Amino acid sequence: MIFNCAVTVKSFKSEYWIKMFNLLHEDLDLDLLNQTSFPIPFLLVKYRDVLWKNKEKIGKVFLNPINIKTVDLWRIWEYVQIIASIYHFSNNNLNNKKILSLGAGFEPCLFTLAKLGAEVYASDIYFSPNYWHSDLVKYIYEKPEVFSHYKTFKPDINYLNLNLKSKKSFAKLGKFDIIYSVSSLEHIYNSFRKKKKMFKRIANHLNANGILSFTTELIIKYEKKPMYTIYFKKFLSTLKKLIRNHNSSDNKGAIKSSNTKALRLYEGIIKSNIKSDYFRKIFNMLESLPRDNRRYDFYTIEELLSIIRVLSKQKLKLVENIDWNTCTENVVCTDNLVFSNYPAKQYRTSISLTFLKE
């Protein structure tokens, strides 16, 4: 099996990968497919909404070299890849292994790894008002077993409130035999410098001979040209705060304007009248905004290589070389998606990496 690779049809040629795929799926509670109210286990949501929404599709193979190219199905590949990597490099024995999932939500990996005998800790900002599914948090207290996608196995998962941006949150953690994350770590910071520091903190909570495994969005290619439109709303928002805080009404026309030329004119006027450190900080921030046509919460290949070097200094080594040939096998061009969120002419894939700590 290829462990360090992007989404690839080669996975389906591996008996071991298929074994892990079956392990994830055996004993699925398919009766939940018709459930319309929360909570529905995430794996079954994918089945219902992407492939099995029509009754005639029930029973079809969910992942294969044809439908893997559908971006919504990548996540299932990532689940299997993570489970396979962790299980293999634990010598096929997870009994009493202490596992931490970062940005876990209620992902299927949690329950499969617990089913294999591990002591599983799911971490996320569960108890924050900003949690993306705050309506589900009540079940953590009342009935956490509903998150399991299995019919007969309802494991005990330890749910931890963990803000990956907070050093204090990390300080409360102990050490783990295995730490993993499924396409979450790239979204914590836009600043690459802060991303690298985060990986250092993660490495500090891994036991000797421990495993770090994660999947992440990877930008293969993007158009390197100035683009200001994506930051236009952010700029206007900043100006609104400026005007509100300083009780000025002279520049309200600029706030409402959608004319780029007018915006630059007002920007020049305000810059020429800066009188406080507050104003200077605001405009320094605006001038430092990235201008390239890419998402900054995804990694480029160069950035990923830099993170690998950072982890290497923390005595974390890749379990095998990366198969870079797989990176262009199923790339997705985001031309047809929302401009403000997915810049045009950005090509991306999902990649899986596993490390062992010396």
Image: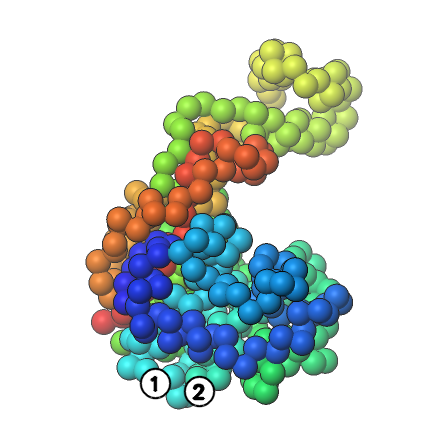
Callout 2 touching callout 1 (CB < 8 Å): yes
Q: Amino acid at mark 1?
A: Asn
Tell which of 123 and 147 is nearer to you.
Answer: 147
Q: Which residue is labeled 1 in the image?
A: 93
The structure residue drawn at horizontal position 53% and vertical position 65%, both measured from the top left corner, is: 60
Q: State the SS at label 2.
A: loop
Decide if residue 24 is on the left or right side of residue 199. right
Would you place residue 302 above or below residue 131 in this image? above
Tell which of 174 and 227 is nearer to you.
Answer: 227
Q: Which residue is labeled 2 in the image?
A: 117
What x and y, as percent, mark residue 292? 43, 29
Decide if residue 308 is on the left or right side of residue 79. left
What x and y, as percent, mark residue 227? 49, 24
| Quadrant occupied by the C terminus | bottom left
The structure residue drawn at horizontal position 67% and vertical position 31%, both measured from the top left corner, is: 237
Tell which of 255 and 145 is nearer to you.
Answer: 145
